[in-house]
Image (tube, rainbow, N blue to C red):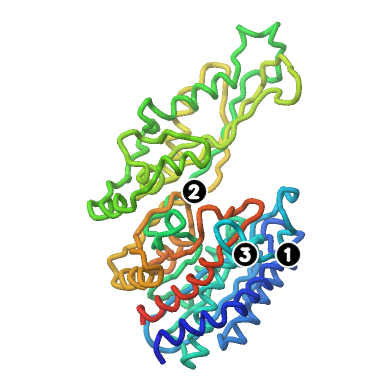
Amino acid sequence: MSLDAVLARIDDDLPAATERLLDLLRIPSISTDPAYKADCDRAADWLVRDLSELGVEVSKRPTPGHPMVVGHVGDSGPHLLFYGHYDVQPVDPLDLWDNDPFDPQIEETAKGTVIRGRGSSDDKGQLMTFVEALRAWKNVKGDWPCRITFFLEGEEESGSPSLVPFMKENADELKTDIALICDTGLFESRTPAIVTMLRGLLGEEITITGPSLDLHSGMYGGIAMNPIRVLSKIIASLHDETGRITIPGFYDGVPELSDDLEAQWQGLAFNHQKFLEDVGLSDPAGEQDRTPLEMIWSRPTCEVNGIWGGYTGDGFKTVLPSKAHAKISFRLVGTQDPLAIRENFRAMVSEMLPPDCEVSFAPHGASGASGADFSDPMFEAARKALSDEWNIPAAYIGCGGSIPIAGHFQQILGTEPMLIGFGKDDDALHSPNEKYDMESFHKGIRSWARILDALT
């Protein structure tokens, strides 16, 4: 049987595939809220049942948190692992949803037909594109394209606390030639892409303490050190006038972009003005000697995510606060060492403290960047398969965000990650009225069929 027969089966089976996705979307598998623990378990059971009916040797594996779903098929050819997650983000604020987040709907919009509901794009819809491609392949050809391991997680949206221990305990079972991750998107909602760069993430919360209690600004203003003033000076010092980050040693391990990749990125003709205009901005604010795509894909950042202190309620309260707080995060690239950056950041802050002030720190995660070695011929085969399906040359791109699982595959299993997804920029991930474009769902299934054919 030819690939054309598989693609035709995907087209014919799209209504049934859509109904299966809607059924999975109805399960409120919110991993971060203990009230939904049973629903997360139910989503895992749903996947076990669906994969089992397809002929996958699959089981639900317990963890200290939500279960993993692990399955295996095939006995010859390259060994591929497919990773996805069945848990979803909370839905608050509920009043901003047009419909019940867990009563998914098919809607007609000005941009086409969409599947609306929590998890439709992140990540249940993406996960099911691979499952449906394999379903069509098996139904048409009666066998599997190669050896495939399914690895489906239930805690991705809550920090994956069980993931690393599970991977270490089951490394022999999970080790494969390539790990396929379907949790990314199309470039500018139209160009198929393989993500080869992911930034790491480091978080720090700092608290500056001055006086032992809040002070009357009339009695103490001018003589007492205000911790908000101290914190403001520290934050202002983190960047110079060109946007470069001033923490000592911060750029150690930051690589320059290769000529080939730089040329490919320039060929994408990224419209940074529209990208910024869509959120009410106009000028790129990063390092001024870098292109906009470099700023969001291949350069590190330092951002203030929250700042507070003193009285912030209605009206006015003339106090000098005892404490001031900030949450600061760093996106990391290349071989930057998050622990070294944490140490250097803390030292810099401590050195800037005036007399009568002290600082405390609270860490929030520390993961390095990851990058795929796309010299492996499988990457180019997958890129050509994507190009054939979308009739647009697929690109190797970066990603400004962090997907720690990609690095875990490399570090724990020695397996190269291949990140391919079909989300669009306006899918409203983590936000009210999340959607998944029906074209993305349909062509995503067809894309995986082409990729499986190309890799085997």
Residue underneath mark 1: 103
Sequence-earlier tag: 2 or 1? 1
Seen at 64% across and 25% down, the residue is 323
Residue 322 drawn above or below residue 303? above
Residue 23 at what x, y percent from top left? Answer: 69, 73
Residue underneath mark 3: 115
Q: Nearer the viewer, mark 2 or mark 1?
A: 1
Mark 3–mark 1 distance (CA, rounded to whole Å): 11 Å
Residue 245 at what x, y percent from top left? Answer: 39, 33
**In the visual, does 280 lie left or right of 400?**
right
Residue 213 at what x, y percent from top left? Answer: 71, 20
The kind of residue tagged 1 is Asp
Residue underneath mark 2: 366
Sequence-earlier tag: 2 or 3? 3
Q: Local crowd at mark 2 within 10 Å, few (<14), some, or many (≥20)?
A: some
Seen at 64% across and 56% down, the residue is 89
Q: Assign a secondary structure to mark 3.
A: strand
Observer-nearest of 108 and 305? 108
For the N terminus, give its image quadrant: bottom left
The kind of residue tagged 2 is Ala
Sequence-earlier tag: 3 or 1? 1
